[in-house]
Amino acid sequence: MKFSKYFLWIGLVLMVALSFYLSYLIWASPASEDQSLVEETEDSQTQEEEDYIAASEVFLPLKAIYINDGGAQASNTESLLEDLQTSIAQSTFGSLDIQSYNSDEELAQHMTLSEGIEMDYAALFPLKNYTDFFSMDLPAEGNDAESFTFQTIQVDFANAKIYFINKKEHLLAEADIQSSLTDIQETLEDDSIDWYDVKKDEQLDYFQYFNDQPVELGKFSYIASSRPYTAFRDSFFTNPNNLRSNEDTEELNIYDGSESMVIEPDDQRVDFQGTTSGEGTFDKYTESYQYIRKLGTNYGSIRFLDSMQNTIDYRIFVEGFPVFSDVDEGKFLVKFSDAGQEDQRSVEIQANLNMIQVPIPSDSEVEVPSGKTVLQDLYYAGADPEKVYNLVVGYSWENIEDTGVVDLEPGWYVQYDDTWYSSEELMQQLQESED
């Protein structure tokens, strides 16, 4: 009996000790448990950030031209542009110097390369944004460099220099390249790059290279689908978790405070209205990118195409070429305006839920005429050379009725008087105006 009491007392002591130990684990160490939750949340946020599309992908130039041995070849291959930009960004530069010229002819003389590369944007682009987005260390001093915009980048192999060229204002900013050009030159020798021959014709344009012979480009077909509106909701709204919707109308209307999004059921157009902070210096490129980057790769390759006043035009690109549609398919137009309050600015985003998804295998090709021929025909039809700002190859989005299939066919697109037209559409308008 004495032994039973003895063991009973030992059991009670152990149970009390265990109780105190468990209480200690519960009350004395919540900080470590909370920390693990914080780390899990941070990991989730980090993963979300990694899914965002990088500025260095969104703001790539449209094409690259390789000048060598007295000839020139062009390519729109995105991997080539990415590799070239990476090599350029990792280079070491001397101080930037800006020169002004009196005419197209004078500027064109200083743009002549014997060996090097040229890359183009479809619109003037701020040098400051370029160096920020591509993480470049380019020494520059003064307000002129801070506000400098350009449309063309040149890397001169013979003189080891980089040039940023503003053709509209006859400005050229140059800097010495103090590091090796080997990486850039080796990138150009990749056998997988699709090159096509191009030439300059100063009678048509002092600066642009055009293919003077037709080229064969692929015609693509895709199975299309309507993406869930939640992708836009989560990308555009400041707080997408606390939204209300109006289901009493045919249109889907989602709203919260000063932000709203309307989706039209017939053509799946999206119209987002919101506000951004009006404090500090306004930068339409950085501000608009904050909305686009969250879309990630859900919509394929999204890239900057054009800029006019306070509007930025982003497009999906296929095989390195922008896509054009009559109802904003594949397009993300971001507009900023004065909200009427000192600390706010209004923003509107126009887009479309319809997107291409699954490619349909095809070997079909389309012959695209030479850019030189297209430009000559437009001038003969009465186009004003002062209003022709750009000529690019793009893909037209054509929905095949009742099939869920989209055909993408290559052709020339012209930026004429601040509006993009297919070359055929602009030709028809010019002919009708002549009649």
Image (cartoon, helix red, strand yellow):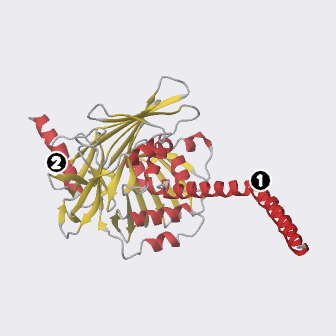
Identify the residue at horizontal 73%, vertical 54% (top origin).
30
Q: Secondary structure at mark 2?
A: helix
Above or below, 264 relative to 405: above
Expressed as whole percent of the image width and height from the top left, the position of residue 118 reads 41, 60
Please give the residue where the numbered disc 1 appears in the rendered image: 27
Q: Quadrant of residue 143?
A: top right
Specify the amino acid type for callout 2.
Glu
Q: Are marks 1 and 2 in contact (CB under 8 Å)?
A: no
Q: Sequence-wise, which precedes: disc 1 or disc 2? A: 1
Out of 130 and 277, give the one closest to the viewer.
Answer: 277
Q: Horizontal placement of 363 versus 258: left or right?
A: left
Q: Position of residue 183 (x, y in %)?
A: 51, 71
Q: Please identify the quadrant where the N terminus is shown.
A: bottom right
In the image, residue 419 above or below residue 303:
above
Question: Can residue 371 be seen by looking at this rendering?
Answer: yes
Q: Residue furthest top?
A: 340
Residue with the mark numbered 2 = 424
Q: Residue at x 58, y 32 (%)?
A: 279
Q: Is residue 422 above or below residue 223?
A: above
Q: How far across and down, in percent of the image, does residue 189 sit?
A: 41, 75
Task: Pick the residue in front: 200 or 347.
Answer: 347
CA distance for labels 1 and 2: 76 Å
Residue 179 in which image quadrant: bottom right
- In this view, which residue lies farthest toward the left? 435
Label ID, residue 273: none
Label 1 sits on what residue type?
A: Trp
Q: Quadrant of residue 215?
A: bottom left
- Residue 146 percent across, percent down from the top left: 57, 43
Q: Outermost residue toward the bottom?
A: 191
Mark 2 crowd level (few <14, some 14–19, many ≥20, 10 Å Cα): some
Which residue is rendered at x = 40% and y = 45% of the image? 232
Q: Which type of secondary structure does the marked residue at label 1 adopt?
A: helix
